[in-house]
Image: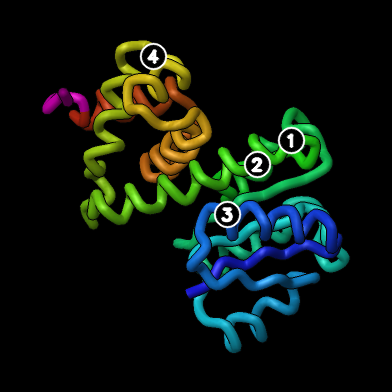
Amino acid sequence: MSIYVIDDHPLMRDAIVMVLRRLRPAENIVELERLDKLPAGVKQHGEPKLFCLDLKLPDVTGVSGVIALKQGYPEVPIAVYSASPAADMEEACIEAGADIYIEKSAGSGELAAALKGLLQADVETDDAAAPASPGKLSKRQTQLIAMLDQGMSNRDIAAQLDISEHTVKVHLWRLFRRLGVKSRTQALHHARSHGLLSSGTN
């Protein structure tokens, strides 16, 4: 399996790859200039385990690249990065299926923290062996619901679980997707309506 970095700007692509190699030196990282080169890349380098996608490519418009990746590889996490401010595009990207949105203006430390959070969340998801039943939550997701019920902020949750706020965001987005909701309020309403808070967590 490989990590795919899809970006038509060599300097930005190099920066993303450099951060990924620092975080995961043993991973095979594949660089592509366009989304339409992905099928050939997968055939040559193997199935993807993570996509790092520039929002603006020669062959995509708006969030169409995110939608295409999610349709072709629904289980593979997507990190989107863009020159557009998060206030303009983040919500649309998450709605389309991205796991995290990173502004290109972010420093290398913030970029590394965001990608590390996404990779760490993947490991935790794998380790948790989340139940196949869509009505049930993984141990981590049950923890998050309980913390939301306590009114804890992302910063509070990060401190309690000893993870980064970026990782908290990734976990929350995945929780919302699993529940079919778009906000904390909706997640809590769903959890209460379906008895997901009854067992509690410690």
Q: Which tag, 3 or 4, sits closer to the chain's start?
A: 3
Q: Is residue 46 above or below residue 156?
A: below
Task: Give the dominant element type of the magenta stretch: helix, strand or loop.
Answer: loop
Residue type, numbered disc 3 = Arg
- Mark nearer the viewer, 3 or 4: 3
Which quadrant of the figure has residue 9?
bottom right
Q: Which mark is residue 152?
A: 4
Q: Earlier in the sequence, mark 1 or mark 4?
A: 1
89 to the left or right of 52: right
- 10 or 85, nearer to the observer: 10
Question: Is residue 133 at least partly visible in the picture?
Answer: no
Q: Is residue 140 above or below residue 119?
A: above
**Relative image position of residue 31 (x, y in whole percent):** 70, 71
Kind of residue at badge 2? Leu
Q: Nearer the viewer, mark 2 or mark 4?
A: 2
The magenta stretch is 197-202
Pointer 2 and pointer 1: residues touching (CB < 8 Å)?
yes
- Of 2 and 77, nearer the camera is 2
Is 104 placed above or below 46 here?
above
Between residue 151 and residue 19, name the one nearer to us.
19
**Element type at marker 2?**
helix
Q: Residue at x 56, y 38 (%)?
A: 113
Q: Which residue is mark 2?
A: 111
Q: Hey, which quadrant is residue 38 in on the image?
A: bottom right
- Return the residue at label 3: 22
**Cα distance in 3D space between marks 3 and 4:** 32 Å
Residue 33 seen in the figure: yes
Residue 201, magenta (yes or no): yes
Residue wearing tag 1: 106
